[in-house]
Image: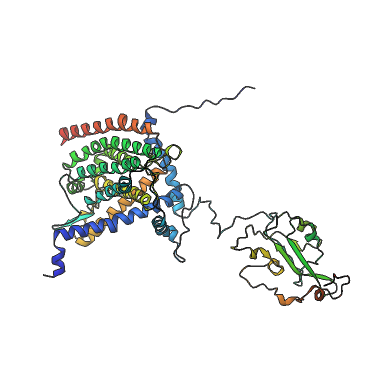
Amino acid sequence: MELKVKQMQRVDGFKESLYLPALFMGFRLTVRHFFRNLFGSKDVVTVQYPEEHRPVSVRWRGRHRLTRREDGFLKCVACYMCETVCPAKCIHIDAGDHPDLSVEKYPVHFDIDELRCVFCGLCVEACPKEAIRMDTGVISMAFTSRNPFDFTRDLLKDEYQPNEVTKFSDADLPQPKSQAEALPNSVGLPAA
Amino acid sequence: MNPLLEILSIPLVQTILKIMFMIMIFAMPLGTLMTLMERKWSAMVQDRVGPNRANVGNFRGHGLAHIAADALKSIFKEDTIPEGSDRFLYLIAPFFGLIAGVSVFAIVPIAAPIGNFTFQITDIEPGLLFIFAITSLSVYGAVLAGASSNSKFALLGGIRASAQMISYEVFMGLALMGIFMVYGSTRVSEIVDGQNAYWFGSLIPKWGILTQPLGFLLFTTALVAETKRAPFDAPEGESEIVAGYFLEYSGMRWSAFMLAEYLAIVGVAALLTTLFFGGYHVPWLHLWESAPVWLVRVLQFTKFTAFVLFCCWFQIQLRWTVPKFRFDQTMALGWKKLLPLSLANTVATAAIILIFV
């Protein structure tokens, strides 16, 4: 194969050795940028990170959230699908009998250890109820200790804001003290 | 007589007050401001935001707090002294540059005198020759720092810096010969007053940049080379000799080098304003004959400061516009082009003055 060689024209001579025309052209460019950015930061592409975020794709797998039904209860029926499929074993669910008999079960505890999570998205695919999703767009979870990474059920509910009291309080659901108390109608519970 | 006024009328007290004003209120704040402005302005040229994170409480002031943050950081950093270095020379080297940077302000007038009182620390007869003497002193800072650090990179940087500064000093003086001839003096106050004259009645002021355009270019080039800034920053080359002659320094002594560089920028700006932009003289102000004295002085100081700021901005813009010269190119430009040019400028100016004036 014949190599393509582009011969560059070397600019030389009196005008080049004066430096001043080139200097003037350079100044025209930099001064234009300087004044454009001095009045209104028009060309600046910097994202001021903690205050501003770049938009993430809707398919980005971020922090999990638990979706809710129209009446405000969690969609989750505590079927353990996600806990079973999770390769990192970071989901821990405790099921309880829902007061609404048509629902059957609800998660008493739904904990995700986000430090162990590998963000593979298998829990989302496994869920039969579309109860768990990873579309919060939260791409960074930064805390100064390990404990806050254990996201409990109420922290994972959607519309959760760190500094906002959620509409969906703990009082909305019964708070059983033990597994036996949580599943009074079930049979075959392991002996306490 | 009021005892306070009596004390203030002693020339020595006046001089000390002037020195304190020029250094504490004018030069140092502008120099430290330039350390931030260099980063902010370079950011604007390169479509960035620049430093804006340091804050005092909720006050960020577009990065103003970075000045204090940088100073605090430098103070608390360890002042390392490399093994095998010449301790005494290593410790004093940073302050040569500072002294040279500050000394420029000794002869720069910032407003017209009122009676016997001059707004200038001292108006010595040699004037600018004093500046040449002082700037040659600043070579010692680079040489001593490079030689005493016991580091090959620092030594190479020191050699480059000294070679460059000495070469460019040669025609820095020659470039100003034209100015000396046109205004007939080396005394700064006479040069400044000479620029208060006009061509064609009172149409065009006889500023140095108009009487000596080539001299202005040459002198600016020489001063930029003297401050070791781009495009003449061969003494510091990241890819070859890292930070050059102050490679081994840290903490406050490193900051002294940086402050010296930015003081030099302000000093250069003050010199350029004084010699080529009419100094403190506001053009066409003489047309307003009933102007009160204090207002004229305020206007003059404002004009002087504005042009100093402009010249500072110009130097920083220059650094972020042009690529650096290779070291041999620096020397070739200095000796083969600028030195003959400044000689020609001197001869041509002399001939024109001899024939036409």
Query: Quadrant where the N terminus of chain A lies?
Result: top right
Q: Where is residue A92? Give x, y as percent.
A: 75, 64
In the image, farthest residue toward the front: B84
Is residue B250 visible to us here? yes
Q: Where is residue B52? Give x, y as percent.
A: 47, 57
Q: Nearer the viewer, residue B132 or A26?
A: B132
In the image, farthest residue toward the left: B1
Q: Nearer the viewer, residue B350 or B130?
A: B130
In the image, farthest residue toward the top: A2
Q: Nearer the viewer, residue A34 or B260?
A: B260
Q: Where is residue A128? Give x, y as percent.
A: 82, 61
Answer with left or right where residue A49 lies relative to residue B305. Answer: right
In the image, farthest residue toward the right: A187
- Residue located 33% across and 43% down the image: B86
Above or below, B318 relative to A190? above
Query: Quadrant where the C terminus of chain A lies?
Result: bottom right
**Which colour style is shown?**
rainbow
Answer with left or right where residue A79 lies relative to residue A150. Answer: right
- Residue located 73% across and 60% down the image: A90
Answer with left or right where residue A170 lies relative to residue B26. Answer: right
The image quadrant of residue B342 is: top left
Is residue A127 visible to us here? no
The image quadrant of residue A51 is: bottom right
Q: Where is residue B209? Give x, y as percent.
A: 27, 42
The image quadrant of residue B55 is: bottom left
- Residue located 60% across and 24% down the image: A3
Looking at the rendered structure, the number of numbered marks drawn on it comes to 0
